[in-house]
Image (cartoon, grey):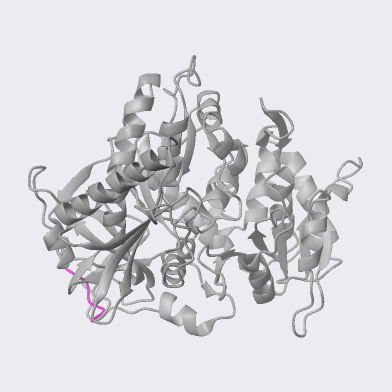
Amino acid sequence: MSVLESSIPAVLGENARRQPSDTAFTFIDYDVDPKGFAESLTWAQLHRRAATVADELRRCGSTGDRVAILAPQSLDYLVAFFGALQAGFIAVPLSVPQFGAHDDRISSALQDCTPAAIITTSAAVDGVIKYAESYGTSAAPAVIEIDSLDFYSTGEFSPVEYEHPKEAYLQYTSGSTGQPAGVVLTHENVVANCHQLESGLFDISGPPESLVSWLPFYHDMGLIQGICFPTVWARPAVLTSPIAFLVEPARWMRLLASNPRPFSGGPNFAFDLAVRRISDDDMAGLDLGQVVGLANGSERVQPASIARFMDKFSRYNLPATAVRPSYGLAEATLYVASAKTGQAPTSVRFQYEQLSGGRATPCTEEEGGSDLIGYGALKSPLVRIVDPETRTETQAGVIGEIWAHGDNIGTGYWRNPERTKRTFGAKLVTPTPGTPEGPWMRTGDLGFLHDGELFIMGRLKDLLIVDGRNHYPDDIEATITQITKGRVAAISVADDTSEQLVAIAEVKNRGGSDEESLAGLRSIKRNVTAAISSAHGVRIADLVLVAPGSLPITTSGKVRRSTCAESYRREEFERLDVSA
């Protein structure tokens, strides 16, 4: 059986046979010890624990049943995930409820997938138990505290090979609140995407020897980078929690410096946070010369962020080719495209007027315009830029919707045939030679090809139409962020006659007297208004300045623009700039 035809449990079993005593996963817990308490599992130990979980789960249901994982970021989470797959269940990775507050996203996902069991830990069970309700005709799920299972009994180990369905897990997309969307991903999708990722990211540099990740396991990038990629490629992974990184970003750099030829990654904001919060003292004695790659993905990559990151960390031998702008989404398992290997990320400046009209025309620095990062030449999966109205492929330099096709594309949304057909069942009209008619997955993202390379504009549904012209919120937000240094949401709001541009921006209160503070806010408003007018040729109708942490975000750190628009209409933002 080739790896490509096998399941994730088969790959895990193969690793346990071939390299039983090699370390598979190490989790660094900074809550137990601020310096980091490390706990590891070998491939054989992980395989054995997964089999124990599988045996427990089979008492709660049968092949194809769902099992939700609501556990803190830990080795227990990994064991639960592998145990669910070993049992022939469909895993549903979710976050653990925070601070006793009700989480609509968790309850709506559970209502959608009707799990036979929920796996949690004894520390989190009190917060989880209230989510274990019966839904419709399905019985209330069994709640299993994974750390109360007997993983230590000795004796003969022969795991039961349960039949497993082609589906491996449901990835609930970060935008889902009222209407959850669980992307159905198969074992084949995962293994294929790990291979695509490997050939896309490491065809020149050679594969990494270790993986480092702090991303949440319930998010597509965290699940693939932290759990699936290390397993399919039988390489050790060193993991920690998102909170550990947010509290002290230097921990990320220390883990990169202390592991052999590591690969890691995170959203664009993580690269900005690392620059802002890591001091030269934090970096004393650290050498990043071994880093094979750092994927910057899950939100649009900003050229200025990469420039600042390289400027700071190249002093510690971080290779110029390390940062890899990458594009992906849950519907494609994860990976779709990444910038070329063996060269530093490149950005191109395009005329803003032309971009607003749907075309990409390069221009010089002096002409003004938008700097966009290149996401590389497209190899596998197949990608085409398509006019969403006519469903025909666009010419190079013409902006359209990004469509993808390949073995990594999920099979649809869980029990949602209508939405599945709309997103996963697209067909091209008169496709070019060598291009299949379908089915294509519509990403909902706008982009274009220039010199054979992919460039991304932003979400189709977030496109702002102001004064009859298209404006891309990512571009406007990038301009404002250079001034405010915080998260920004650019939205359009209708008045009696037209759509108006509004931006909500997080700014740090710089202290001082009330008068000084208001003078600072007035200065920000003037600078932003001038910059938006100059760079984008549009007037900003209202700039709302709010405290850090005010903007609603998804699990992957993206700003929820539609929620911002609703909150703005209801006047729910607590403005710092009322008198400014």
Query: How many badges with numbers are in the image?
Result: 0
Overall secondary structure of the magenta section: loop
Q: Quadrant of residue 156?
A: top right
Whole-percent x and y of residue 522? 30, 48
Q: Residue at x 44, y 60 (%)?
A: 329
Q: Is residue 504 left or right of residue 163?
A: left
Does residue 521 sit above or below 333 in this rendering?
Answer: above
- Residue in front for this viewpoint, 558 or 12: 558
Left or right of residue 535: residue 43: right
> In the image, what residue occupies the spot 28% across and 44% down?
523
Q: Which range is magenta?
A: 390-394
Question: Closer to the camera, 467 or 83?
Answer: 467
Q: Is residue 63 above or below residue 74?
A: below
Q: Indicate left or right for 376 with 266 as reference.
A: left
Task: Verify whether residue 392 appears in magenta.
Answer: yes
Instruction: Name the spot of residue 462 as percent of width and height, x first.
Output: 34, 68
Image position of 331 with respect to 217: above or below: below
